[in-house]
Image (cartoon, coloured by chain):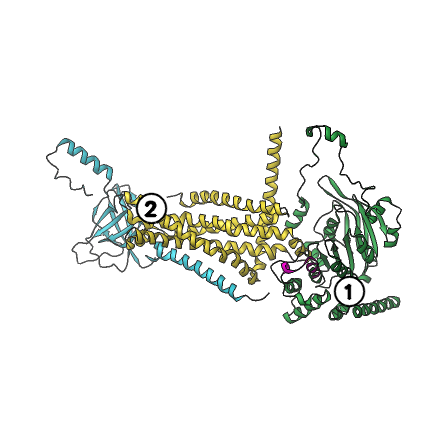
Amino acid sequence: MEFFRYLGASTRESFTKLGRSSYFLIETLSGISSVLMRPRLLLKQMHSVGVLSFLIITISGLFVGMVLGLQGFYILSRFGAEETLGVMVAASLVRELGPVVAALLFAGRAGSALTAEIGLMKATEQLSGMEMMAIDPIKRIISPRFLAGFLSMPLLAALFSAVGIIGGQMVGSGLLGVDDGAYWSQMNANLDFQKDIINGVIKSIVFGFVTSWIALFEGYDAIPTAEGVSRATTRTVVNSAFSILGLDFILTALMFGEN
Amino acid sequence: MSSVDNALVVQRFKLVIAYVRLNRIKPAFTTSLFSNQKNRMDNFNHSQDSLVSVHNLTFSRGERKIFDDISLEFERGKITAIMGPSGTGKTTLLKIIGGQLFPEKGSVTVNGRDVHHLKRDELYTLRKRMGMLFQSGALLTDMNVFDNVAYPVREHTHLPESMVRSLVLMKLEAVGLRGARDLMPNELSGGMARRVALARAIALDPMMIMYDEPFTGQDPISMGALVLLIKSLNVTLGLTSIIVSHDVHETLAIADYIYVLSEGKVIGSGSPEEIKQSSSEWVQQFMNGAADGPVHFHYPAKEYMDDLLHSEKAFKPLFTRQRPPNDRKAKRRRYS
Amino acid sequence: MPHNNTQDTLVGLFVAAGIASLFFLALQVSNLSSFTKGNTFEITARFSNSGGLKVKSAVSAAGVKIGSVKSITFDPKTYESVVKMDIDSQYKTLPDDSSASVFTAGLLGEQYVSLDGGGSDDYLKQGSKIEITNSAIILEKALGQFLFKSAEEKKSSSDDKKGKK
């Protein structure tokens, strides 16, 4: 009996949370028009969300690409298909790893920072204070951050993939002796703009949307204490990771299913 | 009308004297005169003399009734204090007046308007004329002092930057922190942060200010500065002030009228003199700070000896899981 | 709010880098740059079996990619596979008696159409049909034939012309 009571209570709790977060999303989206009128707010957030994630994304991208080059080479060379290394590296980066790993890093780097920032603003009554000054905190605080995350994510994912492909090339043709021309031409012949690049970009846009939403909502919904904010930050990372991986599966099934 | 005019003249005269005496608020002089006039005009549009009235307010948080059918009046141009021990929901009351929380029953009118039946835009328009000083100051941490004070002005007006600058400097001068304009909030002491927040609260020349525990955690000097500021702002700007506090001496010194709350009820009200003379045991305990009295030192528990001799399982836990302090209604409000 | 030029610059650099990588992916990595619609002409070839050929598979001549497969349909009358190909219009001097074969790139690679030039003075143009075609080699079939023959008679192995690769 206790179990069912618990189950019921947690179901109710998750539904109300879903409702709150949907309200929050609608509010946030409706605040975007006012952000566009004040590009300075957006620019500031692009800086803290995008520019400050730049380094971690490029370095991780480089290493992931290099590892892919190495692993791919060992496997492909068994079948004598080393020259398709470029295809393998590029396809895995553009289709999967670019959007997914960049989004996971983004959630860890920028998402958690957003949650902590908003949560602390709530804890220190800054959001309440703005409301009492008749300034909508959603419009001035939340929406710019949301838009910045949403815009930065595809750029970061593209950066990740591009750097990764170059990293794979460095290892593949620089270290392991795959023909440089084959690396690029095979990649060029086998990757499709519509199917691979655009779909990858769509994925990263979806991930950016979801991650920013989760991060900002968790911050806004946090219990305004030190412990509450720390929990909210954890939830941001965990929930973002789940959503990114789950959505990745669904999107992959939808996009590459009919092949 | 002529007697009113006389009153105004007297008021202005007092005001000038106050300025001269304080000598720091001088630059704020002209604007405050205008805003004063504006506020006065509003006052006469409504025949009542209370700016804020709370009628039969009931508000609960979870099981606990924070306010149980209380009614309060806050007179225009006066300093009204709400006192009571911690946890009586004094801050909650300010949030209800500000329209951030919704009452279960009862209504709150500010300047003749029912706060909780306003549309969002109307509520925001009203809030522009209601200042609130949060306990923590609630300064935006990513801007310096100047930008913090300028923030509401820039948001709500389209004044040229030069005018914003003079306005902000006037307000900062009024709180004595013109020299601190380039500091960041984390470089300010608690008392300074509160004074900056006060400058920000008066930036739009509101008709009223709500002070949430303005004296808590202040050293005697900044406490004295705040007391002086609140009083002088009240006089010079003709502000209606609502102070929520449990600091007896400071509050008694500046309040015109005091309500004492406990357990959701008003248990005493009157001028500071009347409160001091109150026959209520409870009020006396609060005013004198006695450890035991009608409010017990001990949190309700079972008999001490029983408790020591018996195992934990025998009774219900004292601390059940509490709802987070932001209850559902408040949230609905914020998301709607 | 004070204007912060460094911040502007950094955001500008970030956005530029992001967009540059998008372009890099689009142009360098994928085949967006290879063909743009409009300056191609279409030719048709019939194969008795087009194997694993797919839409967008490459069409090459002498190992150079000159076009791509546009559509593959089955002709229910002749039981043949009808493959339409778009050839880049810069290659308009292919002889009209060229032959088309379906080959596999490497042992496990993609299948592609290879055009081998003939000796005609007329060139392939929009709507031309290629008469001489070699079907895809189905690995299982070839293997089966090879095993069958080698088991039956070891003496004659010269028949196996198809056992390429």
The letter of the yellow chain is: A
Q: x and y percent of residue B334 in the render? A: 65, 50
**Chain ID, mark 2:** A
Does residue B237 lie above or below A59 as drawn? Answer: below
Residue type, mark 1 in image:
Leu
Residue B177, located in which quarter of the rendered image? bottom right
Q: Are marks 2 and 1 in contact (CB under 8 Å)?
A: no
User: Which of the numbered marks, if any, corresponds to residue B237?
Assistant: 1
Residue in the image at 59% along x and 40% along y = A14
Observer able to see residue C102: yes
Chain part drawn in magenta: B181-195
- The answer to whether B193 is drawn above or below residue B29 in the figure is above
The chain painted green is: B
Instruction: Report which colour depicts chain C.
Output: cyan
Q: Position of residue C52 (x, y in %)?
A: 29, 43
User: What chain does mark 1 sit on?
Assistant: B
Residue B191 magenta-highlighted: yes
A143 lies left or right of B273: left
User: Residue A249, image x and y in percent?
Assistant: 45, 42
Classify residue B71 as left or right of residue B328.
right
The residue tagged 2 is: A72
